Amino acid sequence: MPVNCAAIASELIESELFGHVKGAFTGASDSRNGLFYYAHGGTLFLDEISELPLAMQTRLLRVLEERKLRPVGSEREVPVDVRIIAACNRDLAAEVQAGRFRQDLYYRLAVVDIALPPLRARAEDIPDLMRHFMQQLAVQLGVAPLPLSHEVVSRLQAYAWPGNVRELRNFVERSMILGSFVTDAFAGAAPALPPPAGELELSLAAVERRHIERVTAACDGNKTEAARRLGVSRKTLERKFAEWVEERQARAEPGGEAAAPTGLERRA
């Protein structure tokens, strides 16, 4: 039984997993069994488990430990025998350190931990994945698989695939609809070149500042969006920009005019 934890509202996830009895909450006109009930004797796949609210993580841990669950609004516990497979697109260990995921639940789930590298790190899998997708899509689209040439594979293996396997599947489907592999968009794909010699002499602080300014510029000065892309809080970003303004003013000559604010600072 698969369930996407990110696709269910936080106030409904407990009922979806454990079920509820009639009258347990507003709108509960009938009793309902949860996904644990239907997965009894089998496997429950919890996709995007990092999206579970902390309160729900506590309840899930108890079910895993006790092998019993209590439907919402019920006074009795129901025994369950379920194998759990959990998946996440984040580093759960880092989520634990950040306080967004319970440490005890993490160690309860991490019996066998499989880290799946991004597609760009396993480019040798691309030909096999493409053949697999073509076999699936040939039946769905009613067309024959396309022949794979060395040139096509080479171009695709040099591409970074930011959308990972989903992007590759979409490319295969588009190609089968069009009747050929259109790789013009990947023609310029090549391994990243080393930075210019001048950039190698920059300090870590200068590299950090240049990267933050570029990301903020790409967001049209929207610091909230820039902070999201950089993985920091807006407050941290505001502090960085304030420090840089102070540094520039401190370097200004006495009696002279301070350097004009940049476009990014004016937008702030």
Image: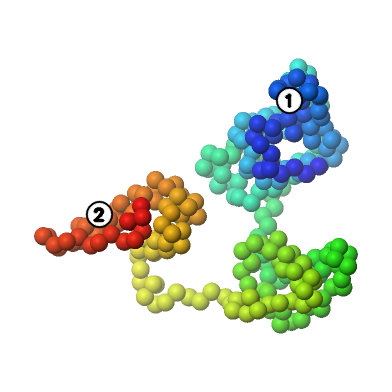
Q: Is residue 39 above or below residue 112?
A: above
Of residues 219 and 208, the one nearer the viewer is 219
- Badge 1 marks a residue whose secondary structure is loop
Q: Is residue 150 left or right of residue 121?
A: right
Q: Can residue 205 be seen in this view?
A: no
Quarter placement of the N terminus: top right
Q: Where is residue 127 in the image (x, y as percent from the top left)?
A: 76, 72
Q: Is residue 87 above or below residue 143?
A: above
According to the picture, the residue beneath numbered tag 2 turns out to be 246
Q: Which of marks 1 and 2 is nearer the N terminus?
A: 1
Q: Where is residue 109 in the image (x, y as percent from the top left)?
A: 69, 41
Q: Where is residue 66 in the image (x, y as percent from the top left)?
A: 74, 28
Q: What residue type is labelled 2?
A: Glu
Badge 1: residue crowd in 10 Å (few <14, some 14–19, many ≥20): few
Name of the residue lying farthest toward the top: 75
Of residues 9 and 112, the one nearer the viewer is 9
Q: Which amino acid does label 1 sit on?
A: Gly
Mark carried by residue 180: none
Q: Is residue 140 left or right of residue 68?
A: right
According to the picture, the residue beneath numbered tag 1 turns out to be 27
Of residues 113 and 248, the one nearer the viewer is 248
Badge 2: residue crowd in 10 Å (few <14, some 14–19, many ≥20): few
Count the labels in the image.
2
Distance between mark 1 and mark 2 Cα atoms: 57 Å
* Residue located 71% across and 77% down the image: 182
- Badge 2 marks a residue whose secondary structure is helix
Task: Identify the image quadrant of residue 116.
Answer: bottom right
